[in-house]
Amino acid sequence: EEIQYMHERRQALGGYVPTRVVRAKPLELPGDKTYATVKKGTGQQAIATTMAFVRLLKDLLRDKEIGRRFVLIAPDEYRTFGMDSFFPSAKIYNPLGQQYESVDRELLLAYKESPTGQLLHDGISEAG
């Protein structure tokens, strides 16, 4: 009787081996237009891999369907790789928002923090 009960309970719970039920809706991927600029290149001049990658990230961040899902993580190198153009629009994540006046606040590409930021800025230690 107990064995019968155990078999019935297992069946009611979906079987003997746990399975994961995925309920997420599939994402609509951006069309070819998003990748066209990088595929086309610059024409006459060779383009650096980093520059092409940053351009692609910028276009993906601007995509209306999936752009908000991107969170970029960089260890104190956004400016080095030319990603400071993301600061005004994507902003750097800080749960408390901007708590100070940045030294570059007068610049077009000023360092901006926000609770809704999409950039994670990891600090580094050079004391080493």
Image: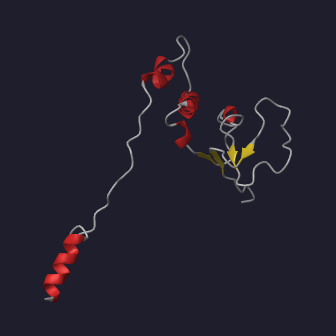
Near-viewer residue (32 or 43)? 32
Residue 45 position in % (x across, y down): 56, 14
Label count reads 0
Q: Is residue 56 shown above or below 119? A: above
Q: Residue at x 64, y 44 (%)?
A: 119
Q: Residue at x 15, y 85 (%)?
A: 3
Q: Residue at x 65, y 38 (%)?
A: 90
> Is residue 85 left or right of 56 when viewed as pictured?
right
Q: Is residue 78 shown above or below 40? A: below
> Is residue 106 left or right of 111 when viewed as pictured?
right
> Is residue 38 left or right of 92 when viewed as pictured?
left
Near-viewer residue (10 or 47)? 10
Near-viewer residue (87 or 9)? 9
| Residue 16 shows in the view | no
Q: Residue at x 18, y 83 (%)?
A: 5
Residue 2 position in % (x across, y down): 17, 88
Residue 67 position in % (x across, y down): 54, 36
Q: Is residue 97 shown above or below 48? A: below
Residue 64 position in % (x across, y down): 53, 32
Q: Residue furthest top?
A: 44
Q: Quadrant of the C terminus?
A: bottom right
Near-viewer residue (69 or 57)? 69
| Residue 48 shows in the view | yes
Quarter of the figure with residue 52: top right
Q: Quadrant of the N terminus?
A: bottom left
Q: How is the image coloured?
A: secondary structure
